[in-house]
Image (cartoon, rainbow, N blue to C red):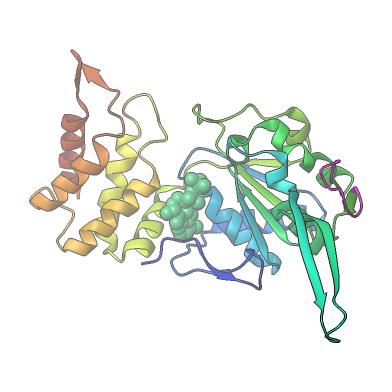
């Protein structure tokens, strides 16, 4: 089964994509309500920002919203190595063209042209053509790499600083251009403190975990496993979130993984199924491995206890 939130179809020569509703997308009332609200903010010209822990469906939601806008989508992933030229473009050197006119044999005319060529990058293309920008995990990029976005969002102008030797020093942002950001504020490794100026221009919506019934529906849609088995897996995971220091783990991704593997090997979500017990152990015991007793990780034991107690209840 396809894990992508939406089918992504390459459109044209550039590397932008046209999103389509993907199979297995679960449109809960919460998702539908949020989508409508966000679409009204975007329609009024405001960029939106989904902030929340891993596995809360931020990226999926960004794609879902983008699909409603019916424009090609430019996808950028935040990256520490990013510089502003990765976002807007760079001089890629000289292009040399040579014309040799040898039509009359006795006369050889040659002409050489050197042009500086400018390679537009994704943000420039999106601004110019009015695409929808999804900037996933944007806080992973260094704040100065994102500076070009400030005037794009506020003045609707993209500055192409001295980098661009040919053409204008700026372009006007196309009226159809829209921007959706995601970030995980809790992630402490590899994330930069966002500059206030950028955050101030975004409408930030805090996303938290789905409710139980949505999680069950998502696991079911993504794995094809019977609902009763999905319920057991989700209950185990929700119980485990109470253990240890991080209440956001395990995420829905772990539920989907267990459900899919179990669907693949066959069998039920029950303590009598050895395969199920091992899958749970492998996928869940590492997650909260920080919980120790006398230097030993107690997670393996906790996983077993919780699996036992959830299975007994049903
Ligand atoms: N509404 C939904 N319908 C179906 N699957 C979803 C939905 N929201 C999230 N998922 C699934 O849950 C997992 C985590 O979602 P994702 O959007 O990647 O979360 P995040 O970006 O917050 O880390 C993915 O496997 C995704 O396909
Ligand atoms: Mg994501």
Rendering quarter of residue 224 = bottom left
Q: Quadrant of the N terminus?
A: bottom left
Residue 65 lies, in percent from the top left, at 64, 59
Residue closer to the observer: 98 or 47: 98
Residue under the point 21% across and 63% down: 264
> Quick check: 298 above or below 77?
above
Residue closer to the observer: 146 or 162: 162
Residue 173 in sight in this render: yes
Report the side of 21 relative to 263 (left or right): right
Residue under the point 38% across and 48% down: 253
Highlighted range, magenta: 160-169
> Quick check: 287 above or below 257?
above
Is residue 164 one of those drawn in magenta? yes
Report the side of 278 relative to 116 (left or right): left
> Quick check: 218 above or below 9?
above
Q: Main secondary structure of the magenta part?
A: loop
Residue under the point 47% across and 43% down: 209
Most distant residue in the top direction: 294
Residue 74 lies, in percent from the top left, at 66, 58
Residue 262 lies, in percent from the top left, at 21, 58
Most distant residue in the right direction: 168
Rendering quarter of residue 112 = bottom right
Residue under the point 72% across and 32% down: 144
Residue closer to the observer: 308 or 265: 265
């Amino acid at each position: 089964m396809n894990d992508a939130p939406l089918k992504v179809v390459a459109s044209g020569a550039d590397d932008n994509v046209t999103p389509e509703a993907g199979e297995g997308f679960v449109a809960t009332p919460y998702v539908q309500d949020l989508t409508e609200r966000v679409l009204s903010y975007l329609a009024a010209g405001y960029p939106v920002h989904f902030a929340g822990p891993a596995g809360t469906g931020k990226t999926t939601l960004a794609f879902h919203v983008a699909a409603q806008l019916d424009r090609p989508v430019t996808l950028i992933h935040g990256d520490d190595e990013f510089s502003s030229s990765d976002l807007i473009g760079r001089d890629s050197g000289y292009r040399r063209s040579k014309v040799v006119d040898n039509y009359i044999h006795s006369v050889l005319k040659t002409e050489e042209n050197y042009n500086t060529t400018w390679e537009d990058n994704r943000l420039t293309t999106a601004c110019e053509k009015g695409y929808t920008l999804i900037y996933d995990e944007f806080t992973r990029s260094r704040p100065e790499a994102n500076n070009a976005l400030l005037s794009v969002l506020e003045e609707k102008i993209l500055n192409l600083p001295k980098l661009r030797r040919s053409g204008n020093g700026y372009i006007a942002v196309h009226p159809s251009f829209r921007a959706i950001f995601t970030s995980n504020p809790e992630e402490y490794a590899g994330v930069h403190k966002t500059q206030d100026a950028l955050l101030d221009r975004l409408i930030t919506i805090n996303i938290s975990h789905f409710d139980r019934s949505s999680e069950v529906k998502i696991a079911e849609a993504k794995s094809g496993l019977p609902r009763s088995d999905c319920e057991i897996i989700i209950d185990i995971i929700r119980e485990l979130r109470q253990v240890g220091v991080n209440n956001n783990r395990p995420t829905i991704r772990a539920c989907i993984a267990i459900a899919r593997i179990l669907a693949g090997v066959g069998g039920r979500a029950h303590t009598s199924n050895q395969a199920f017990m091992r899958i749970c152990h492998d996928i869940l015991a590492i997650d909260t491995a920080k919980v120790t007793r006398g230097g030993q990780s107690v997670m393996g034991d906790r996983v077993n206890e919780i699996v036992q107690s959830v299975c007994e209840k049903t």
